[in-house]
Amino acid sequence: MEIDLRKKCNSSSTETAAKLKLYSYFRSSCAWRVRIALEYKGLPYDVIPIQLMRKEQFQSDFVKLNPMAQVPALIVEEKVTLLQSLAIIEYLDDVYPNVPLLPKDPLLRAKVREISELIASGIQPLQNLRTLHKHSDDPNEKLRWAQFWIHNGLQALEKTLTECSGVYCVGNDITMADCCLVPQVANAYRFKVDTSGFPVIARIEKMLSEEPAFQRAHASNQPDCPPELYSKL
C-alpha cells in the first residue's frame, strides 16, 4: 500500500514550523550537521539524546525508528521519521526556504552537494565509532587509522575549497557544505590531526565558529555533553 507522506505531514509549511524532534548525540558529526541547519534556519526543535558510548542506539525502540541504529533521526509532527543528515537538511531547505542552505544556481547547488558528500561519505564514515571498532581493538591503531583518513580527506577538501570558496565553502553564503565542514574539523581536532597545511579550511571554520547558530549547535552546548568535555570541544 502506497503511503502519502505529504498527507501525514500536511501541517508543514514555509509559514508555520512543524513540530520537530531530533534524536542526537552531542559529538556525532552527522547529528551536528542537522543541528546547525535547524539553528541557522531558526526552527524550534526538541533534542532527544542517544548515548552512543552506552550503545543506546541499539535499543529496540530506537532501532524501530532507524534500522541502521545511527543518529540523527528527525521526527516530523510525530508521524514521519527522516534519516541521513544530508537528506534531512535538504528536506528542511525545501520546506523552509526563507533561509536557504542550497543555492538556486544548479552548478553552485551541485558544488555544495559535492563538498557535503566529500565529507559525509568520503571522510566521516572511515573514522566513526563502528569503523574504528571493526578495524582494531588497539586504541593507538584506531587513532592512526582515523588520522590517516581524516588527513587524506582534508587534503582533497582543501584543494576543492581553494577552487570554489568565497567567504564560506561555496561563495559568500552559508550552505549545507558549511554545516558539514565544522563538525568534521572538530573531529580532526579530536583525533589530533595536523591541520596546519589546510589554511582555507581553517579560515572558513574560524568564520563559521563566530556565527551564533553554529555556536548554539556546537557539541559543547548540547544537553548530553559531559561537563568534563566542555573545554576539550
Image: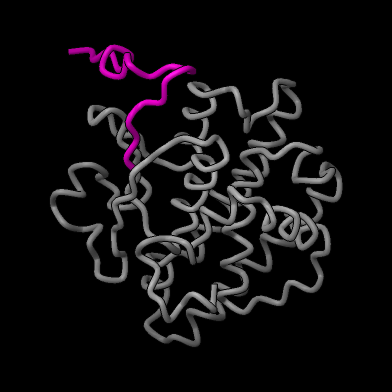
Q: Is residue 49 left or right of residue 186?
A: left
Q: Quadrant of the C terminus?
A: bottom right
Q: How is the image coloured?
A: one colour
Location of residue 88 in the rendering, given as x and y in whole percent from the top left corner: 45, 35
Q: Nearer the viewer, residue 146 or 51?
A: 51
The range drawn in magenta is: 1-21
Examine the rendered structure and indicate whether residue 163 appears above or below residue 147.
Answer: above
Q: Quick check: 229 above or below 51?
A: below
| Number of numbered callouts drawn | 0
Q: Residue at x 48, y 21 (%)?
A: 95
Position of 129 with respect to 233 (left or right) is left
The quadrant where residue 100 appears: top right
Residue 117, percent across and down?
Answer: 59, 44
Residue in the picture at 14% in, 49% down: 61
Magenta span: chief secondary structure: loop
Residue 140 magenta-drawn? no
In the image, is residue 29 above or below residue 13?
below
- Where is 178 relative to 3, above or below? below
Residue at screen point 52% across, 22% down: 94
Could you tell me residue 190's position as x and y percent? 56, 75
In the picture, the quarter occupied by the N terminus is top left
Q: Is residue 1 left or right of residue 23?
A: left
Residue at the image position 23 percent from the left and 42 percent from the top: 65
In depth, the one of 100 and 160 nearer the eye is 100
